[in-house]
Amino acid sequence: MQEMPASRAYRLLEAGPVVLVATVRDGKPNVMTVGFHMVMQHTPPLIGCIIGPWDYSFGALRDSGECVIAIPTVDLAAKVVAIGNCSGETTDKFETFGLTSVPARDVVVPLVADCLANIECRVADTSLVDRYNLFILEAVRIWIDADRREKRTLHHRGDGTFTVDGRVIDLRERMVKWKYLQD
Ligand SMILES: Cc1cc2nc3c(=O)[nH]c(=O)nc-3n(C[C@H](O)[C@H](O)[C@H](O)COP(=O)(O)O)c2cc1C
C-alpha cells in the first residue's frame, strides 16, 4: 500500500453518480453539476448535498427550499461538465445546453427531461449549511424514463475523470439480513 494525501479522500468516495441540481431563482430555472452528495436515510428519504455559497444555485435553494436532482447519463457527459463551468447568474443554462424542462408535480422547479431520472426535493434541514454547505433534502417524488436506451450513469473520480457504469452483479440471494430492500 502506498500513502496518498488525506485531503484526497474525496477521490475515492465521490464516485456516486454525478447529478444535475435544478433550482428556480427570480422565476428562472437554473441547473448546476454536483458530485458531493450522499443518501442519508431510507424513511423519510433524505439526501445530503453540498452546494457552495459561490454557486448561484445556493441562494435559490436556500430561499426557495426546493430543488430537483436530475441523473444524467454518459451521452450527456460533455454538457454535465460545461454546466459545472458556468453560472446561472450570467447564463441561461437550459437554453445554452438545449435542456428540456417539464413541470414537476410537487415543486416549482422543473424536471430535466433529458435525464434518466429526476428526484423532486424539499430542503428538510439547513442546520449544517453554514458550517459545511450541506443541505439535507427530502425526496418527495421520483420520475424515471424507463424507455431511455442509454442508462449508464457517470461517476466523477474527483479530478475531471469519470467512470461510466458497467456490469451489474446480482448478489440479492446473499443479502439475507436485508431482504426488505429488494421489493
Ligand atoms: C464534475 C463536477 C462536480 C461538481 N460538484 C460540485 C459539488 O458537489 N458542489 C458544488 O457546490 N459545486 C460543484 N461543482 C461546481 C458547480 O457545478 C459550479 O460551481 C457551477 O458553475 C455552479 O452553477 P451555478 O452558479 O449556476 O449555481 C461541480 C462541477 C463539476 C464539473
Image: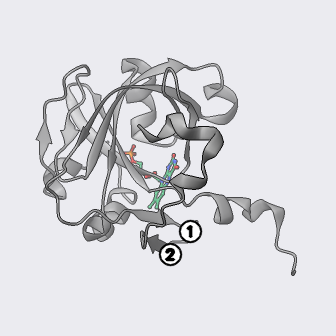
What residue is drawn where x is 23% and y is 66%? 150
The residue type indicated by label 2 comes to Thr
Figure quadrant of residue 69: top left
For this rendering, which residue is in front, 134 or 42? Answer: 42
Whole-percent x and y of residue 11? 65, 65
Nearer-the-camera pick, 22 or 12 = 12
Provide the residue designation for mark 2: 161
Quarter of image, res 167: bottom left
Q: Is residue 178 visible?
A: yes
Q: Are marks 1 and 2 in contact (CB under 8 Å)?
A: yes
Q: Secondary structure at mark 2?
A: loop
What label does residue 35 carry, if any?
Answer: none
Quarter of the image with the C terminus is top left
Above or below — where is 35 with respect to 167? above
Secondary element type, mark 1: loop
Looking at the rendered structure, which numbered label has been put on residue 157?
A: 1
Whole-percent x, y for residue 118 in the image: 28, 41
Q: Residue 1: x and y, percent?
A: 87, 80
